[in-house]
Image (tube, rainbow, N blue to C red):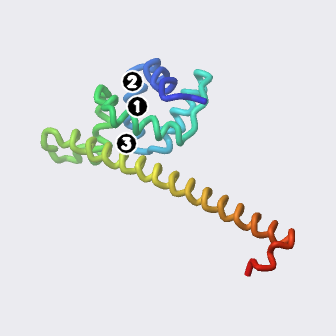
Amino acid sequence: MATIEDFKQIRASVSPEVQSELYGLLIQDLDAAVQKMIAIGAESNVSFTADEISSYLQEMDAEDEFEDIQLDEATLASVSGGGNRGCRQPPGSSQGAIERHKAALGAKLDAEDDVGIAQRRVREAQDALSAGTTAAQKRINEGSGDNFM
């Protein structure tokens, strides 16, 4: 099973340009970025799941490990609204857009975690219900179910 350390090691092994490209993709299309990260891991013979990558990204973001990422002009233009379109953008507007997208990414990762937790709780409840039904059926089949109802 892959670990966050495996993920960090692979991240460190790719060029800054690839890291920047991935970060820009994360801002624009989380699913595509995750799939690309899975492919990069596979090239290094490390298998990641989408859930693992989401978890690793969330943990690394909480530790401010993405502060060193530099976005290229095309990515900055796309996250700030697709370029200046004939208007001069105020200084820092691209950075504000990046921060908003980072916040949205964090919220999406949080929501995915919440969905995963909810799904796990539903499975646990289904398992408990199944076990209870099995136990009740066993009591009925053994004849001790006379007083069951």
Residue receiving disc 1: 21
Above-or-below relation of 111 to 62: below
Position in image of residue 85 (x %, y %)? 23, 47
Mark number, residue 27: 3
Crowding at dot 1, Cα within 10 Å, few <14 / some 14-19 / many 20+, comes out as some
- Say which residue appears at 59% left-offset and 25% top-offset: 46
Position in image of residue 37 (x %, y %)? 51, 32
Q: Nearer the viewer, residue 45 or 32?
A: 45
How far is the residue under mark 1 from the one under mark 3?
10 Å
- Quadrant for the N terminus in the image: top right
Q: Nearer the viewer, residue 14 or 1?
A: 1
Crowding at dot 3, Cα within 10 Å, few <14 / some 14-19 / many 20+, comes out as many
Mark number, residue 17: 2
Above-or-below relation of 26 to 13: below
Mark 1 vs 2: CB contact within 8 A? yes
How far is the residue under mark 1 from the one under mark 2?
6 Å
Crowding at dot 2, Cα within 10 Å, few <14 / some 14-19 / many 20+, comes out as few
Callout 1 secondary element:
helix
Callout 3 secondary element:
helix
- Say which residue appears at 51% left-offset and 24% top-offset: 6
Q: Is residue 138 left or right of residue 31?
A: right
Residue extending farthest to the right is 142
Q: Viewer-nearest of labels 2 and 3?
A: 3
- Quadrant for the C terminus in the image: bottom right
Callout 2 secondary element:
helix
- Say which residue appears at 50% left-offset and 38% top-offset: 34
Residue 71 visible to an observer of this rendering: no
Answer with the quarter of the image where residue 75 lies: top left
Sequence-wise first label, 2 or 3? 2
Position in image of residue 119 (x %, y %)? 56, 56
Q: Is residue 77 left or right of residue 112?
A: left
